[in-house]
Image (cartoon, grey):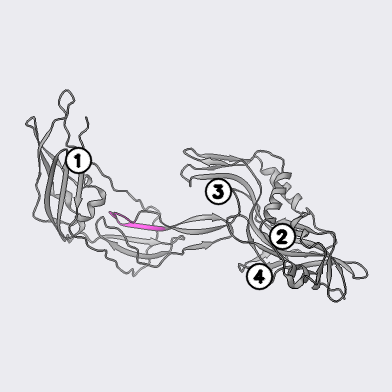
Amino acid sequence: MKANKLFLVFPILISGLSCVACSNKPQYKEDFIFSGPDYEPVQIARNDEEGNPIAVQTITAANIPDKIMIAAWDEYDIKLRVFYADGVRMEIPFREINIPIEFRSMLGQVGEHTFAVETAHLELNFNFKVVENPNFKGYTCKFFDENRYFLHSQVVGYYQDIIYDGIEPKNEYDDEEFQYHFKGWDHPLKYVHQDMQYQAVYEKLEKRNYALKVRNTEFYNIDAIMNGSKTSASVLSYIGRVKRVAAYYGPTQELDTQDLELRFNYDEIGPYINEMNNSIHNVIKYEVDHNYDSLLYGDVASIYNNPYYHNTFNQGYHMSAGLTVALEDNSRAKLSLNNPLDTLYDFILPKLSEKMVVKKSERKGYYRLAVVAAFDAYVDLSYNKLDDGKYEIGNYNYFIFAPDTTTLKVDIQYSEDGKFESTFDTYISLNTRMLYKMANNLRWE
């Protein structure tokens, strides 16, 4: 039978944290090692030769000095003196490692403290006094941002918790493919028991189907083709960019207790291209501006509601290589004029045998291997010119989603719930005002 052992420690005096200003900028140490505190209960239970527990009659503390210096408990050889029912007396070392971690801060707090130790049906209470230790100056804790640039330094007492009071790390930031959200620090701020360095930790959120509009305008006319009488025309217009779109992907797998090996399935590529087109179309938002109801005729809504996707550009358009457009995030997109289908097939086919591994230590959730890229979104629209500045939508209207080959890559995608949907509430506009202006900006005369 296992004897019950419970250690309860009650501090009387709680002291605060201290902090210091940093005069020099410390450097992040690559070889820093964090060693978590250990806890071992005192082994008081004894059994007789038949394995039956021997009762504890009394328990007292031995070698308790009048004063104990901060962070020096183990230097005093403190023991628990235990008398058993069979007449045996034992002196069992009572060291810092035997004190529950959450109560060790009292060993670094000047003042009177009490230990209450309970085991079986016996209780031991003893007082001790903690005084300053001239050799203990506290633990220096240095904080660094995500790029390991120094932020702040604090000095923290023995087994105390850090209340961070320095420069706040960025709550979030972006790069081309991900948004990063601050989640805390890479080591615990509780029970500090060594000099520490901390780096800001961020959870990355993939910019999956992340849409960017054209900056300061709603679209950009690339070129137009007109008939001889200039009564009808088709126009190719750029309306925005969608990032991290999956053009092809492998089976979804859930990460559990083993590493995952992610592969593709050698499936037919065509259905994935259709799904990709639809996913881009889903981040295009169509709206009606009734101020243009009397200026734009034809089945306008069908352009969006019944979309057609073209895999090539009309060769009649003059399209300049290297054309760039400013996007709403203040970046400049070098427009992709690649024929979508041929470009994707040429990239995907050689990649089908690739594989990647997700380590079991990564975030739990769902993973898949995917071919991702940023896609430039275009509309190829036909118009008939009417009188008095009015236009009619023609019969040949298409969307073209062209991949930017500089962003094409095989990558691992993560989902918490197994659904790889758009993770941001972003969209590209398509509205009747835009459709009217696309026509009205042409050189009809």
**Image location of residue 170, percent across then percent down:** 46, 64
Image position of 57 (left or right of 279): left
Say which residue label 2 marks: 377
| Total numbered labels placed on residues in the image | 4
Please state the extent of the stretch shown in magenta in the rendering. 189-199
Which kind of residue does numbered mark 2 sit on? Ala
Q: Secondary structure at mark 4?
A: loop
Please tell me whether residue 258 is drawn above or below residue 109 in the rendered image. Answer: above
Q: Residues within 10 Å of mark 3 (few under 14, many from 20)?
A: many
Q: Which amino acid type is marked by label 3?
A: Tyr
Tag 3 residue = 414
Residue sitting at the far left: 87
* Inter-mark Cα distance, 3 to 4: 30 Å
Was residue 190 drawn as part of the magenta stretch in this picture? yes
Residue in the foreground of this view, choosing between 59 and 131: 59
Reading the chain from its start, which is encountered first: label 2 or label 1? 1
Residue at the extreme right: 229
